[in-house]
Image (cartoon, rainbow, N blue to C red):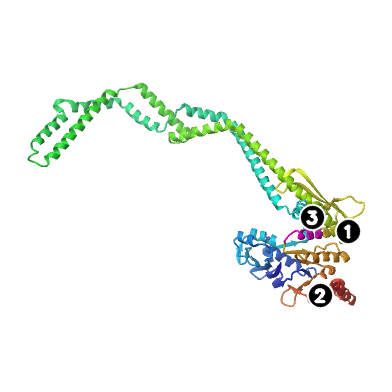
Amino acid sequence: MLKSLSISNYALISNLRIDFDEGFSVITGETGAGKSIIIGALSLVQGQRADTRVVMEGTQKSIVEAAFEIGNYRLQPFFEENELDYSPVCQVRREITVTGKSRAFVNDTPVSLNVLRELSLRLLDIHSQHENLLLSTENYQLQVVDTIAQNQTELTDYQIAFDEWNKAVAELQKLRREAARQSADLDYLQFQLNQLDEANLKAGELAELETELETLSHVEEIKRELLLADSLLSVDELNIRKLLKETENAIQKIKKYLTDANDWSERLLTLNIELKDIASEISAAQERIDFNPERLDYVDNRLSTLISLQKKFKVETEEELIEIREDYRKQLNRIDNFDEELKNAGEKVGLAFEKLKTEATLLNHTRIGTKPVIEKYLIEQLRLLGMENVQFVVNISPTDEFTDKGNDKVEFMFSANKNRTVQAVAEIASGGEISRLMLAIKSLLISKSDLPTIIFDEIDTGVSGEIAGRMGEIMKKMSHSTQVITITHLPQIASKGTAHYLVYKDSSGTSTETRIQQLNPEARIQELAAMLSGKTVTEAALLNAKDLLNN
């Protein structure tokens, strides 16, 4: 329940604190006294959008803080999920600066407005005057049915199936778009792949060809120098190996006299062997290398082909060309297999839709089950509220359109008079009838929920007299399970409250401020009498006020 509300520097309120009792509390006051200001402050606690104009003139920051007793409402998992400190008394604070900065706190921990809104749904329901308009909307009517049906499990299962179906449909549509696009590119892809396939690409080939081209382009020079080298190593009078052998023999003769000679001898032997191998390889190369114009042309053309492909595809290596080739091949294979993919995706959509229809049917059954409950309850309550001939029908019918709430069309049908066919609430109900109908619906919803607090902001619009008193009785009955706070101009309703608060304007100081006070029994009689007779309180009004309080 709402335990207390503190407001500072908000609109016409410099500093205000209200301590609320459990049960049924009423708030009264003249038009313009500031009752709507209090509702506005509470809406900030709910996480509603802030307006810098609410910051009291001459101040820098507005603060609204509400304390809720939540020990009996199983809210600890929510606090744990959002990493908030749990306490049986929850402090919710909202701060609005004159610069437009807004901050929210739960038990002194900063929270986002989304978290605050989610928490407020579990703490407080404010029924504002304009909410009556919602009664005529299909979405609100569906929400009422689902609340009474208590079908959250079925609704969650349906929404999972709905998401899976949407994903399957999206995937099928994506495949169809891709198939159409790829099919349009089929000839282009095939041409590109053919060109790369014909190139018979091999990794590292370009470097090898460039080396070979260098060799083929300088064959004559190479053969000339190889011939010279071979002759230098082979002609007897210039034979280096012969000289090395003679040098080795000379060193051999002095090995026994000179220690270093052994090392020199071995090194000379190694040199001689190495030169022999070199001479053999040079000779073989000279015989092997020959001018081949056909091979030169081939290498040159091959290089041109590879370089041209690299430029065309804007890459630098054969490896990258090979990757592109394989990518084209995969794309073409994908096109070849699109029919199968589309078939599989279509089957997936079909299966998902069958699952969706199954869950929608189960959801529909929960809603259909509430139909007699809602109709019976609302008819009983509306008769208590003076509609003796009321008819109320809940039409629930499946449609071909599936949304995240199911495929049911819900419509509240209503008639307040004999021999009148029921029609949609929006088409037939008057303002006073809407008020009574909304109160009856709220009382039904409260009976099916664990909501700690509900606040009615002049839900009695369009009613008076005995009917107003009956509305007060219904709210009083609601307060046995939920804290009820109502703002009213009707003494018949105000008299039913267990606690009575008066909102008024105080101009005794340098500025006008909105204030609130809880009335004692005597002050309450005076207020009710004033509501009955106006500013001039008559003896009859006082007697009437006492009578209202005693009944």
Q: CA distance from mark 3 to mark 1?
A: 18 Å
- Residue 229 falls in which quadrant of the image? top left
- Residue 514 falls in which quadrant of the image? bottom right
The image position of residue 47, as x and y in percent, is: 67, 61
Q: Which residue is mark 3?
A: 135
Helix, strand or loop for disc 3: helix
Q: Which residue is mark 2?
A: 524
Give the mark, 2 or 3, whose residue is nearer the N terminus: 3
Q: Amino acid at mark 1?
A: Met
Q: Nearer the viewer, mark 2 or mark 1?
A: 1
Give the mark, 3 or 1, whose residue is nearer the N terminus: 3
Residue reaching furthest to the left: 257
- Residue 494 falls in which quadrant of the image? bottom right
Q: Which mark is residue 196?
A: none
Q: Is residue 424 left or right of residue 248?
A: right
Q: Which residue is mark 1?
A: 387
Residue in the image at 8% along x and 37% along y:
254
The image position of residue 251, as x and y in percent, is: 10, 36
Q: CA distance from mark 2 to mark 3?
A: 34 Å
Residues drawn in magenta: 438-450
